[in-house]
Image (cartoon, grey):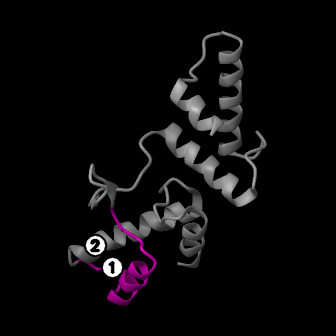
């Protein structure tokens, strides 16, 4: 639970991408346990644990609606690109920079690919770099 509290301090929310490494897997497991709890099945989640999650503002399922209220849907960035971009944002918040080494795993390979696509775009060559992606990466 402390890692989730730390994530909230850094990001201002508790919507951890479930593909976001160990914390993401843990959150996914908690969401499964919550579903079991709600269905009356055996669950590791207790009323006490549920109150602890609520006390830090954790929502087991949520998605903003048009009026910015939350509905009971999984919290996930929309696409694999958006999930990777959110990882980069988190990396920058933690490390103070976005200079991810290409050899540093999945995020590094993704950043390397974005750099390549950006260079192709700047050279006027065919690129998957859209205006929306460029604006996000340049922000």
Quadrant in the rendering for residue 36: bottom left
Is residue 34 left or right of 4 when viewed as pictured?
Answer: left
Q: 139 or 24, which lies in front?
A: 139
Is residue 123 left or right of 3 when viewed as pictured?
Answer: right
Q: Under tag 1, what secondary structure?
A: loop
For mark 2, what is the residue?
Answer: 36
Q: Quadrant of the C terminus?
A: top right
Q: Mark number for residue 133?
A: none
Question: Pointers 2 and 1 in contact (CB under 8 A)?
Answer: yes
Which residue is painted at 41% across and 42% down in the image? 78
For mark 1, what is the residue?
Answer: 43
Q: Is residue 17 above or below residue 122?
A: below
Q: 112 or 121, which lies in front?
A: 121
Is residue 122 left or right of 52 when viewed as pictured?
Answer: right
Quadrant in the rendering for residue 131: top right
Q: Is residue 113 above or below residue 38?
A: above
In the rendered image, residue 50, in percent from the top left (x then y), is placed at 36, 82
Q: Which residues are magenta?
A: 41-61
In the rendered image, residue 79, in percent from the top left (x then y), is placed at 45, 39
Which residue is painted at 32% across and 87% down in the image? 47
Q: Is residue 19 above or below residue 1?
A: above
């Amino acid at each position: 639970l402390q890692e989730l509290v730390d994530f909230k301090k850094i990001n201002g929310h508790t919507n951890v991408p479930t593909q976001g490494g160990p914390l993401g897997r843990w959150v996914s497991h908690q969401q499964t346990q919550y579903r079991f709890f709600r269905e009356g099945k055996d669950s590791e989640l207790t009323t006490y644990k549920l109150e602890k999650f609520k006390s830090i503002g954790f929502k087991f399922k949520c998605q903003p609606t048009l009026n910015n209220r939350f509905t009971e849907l999984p919290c996930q960035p929309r696409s694999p690109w958006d999930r990777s971009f959110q990882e980069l944002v988190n990396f920058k918040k933690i490390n103070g920079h976005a200079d991810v080494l290409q050899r540093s795993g999945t995020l590094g390979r993704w950043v390397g690919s974005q750099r390549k696509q950006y260079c192709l775009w700047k050279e006027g060559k065919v690129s998957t770099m859209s205006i929306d992606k460029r604006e996000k990466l340049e922000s």
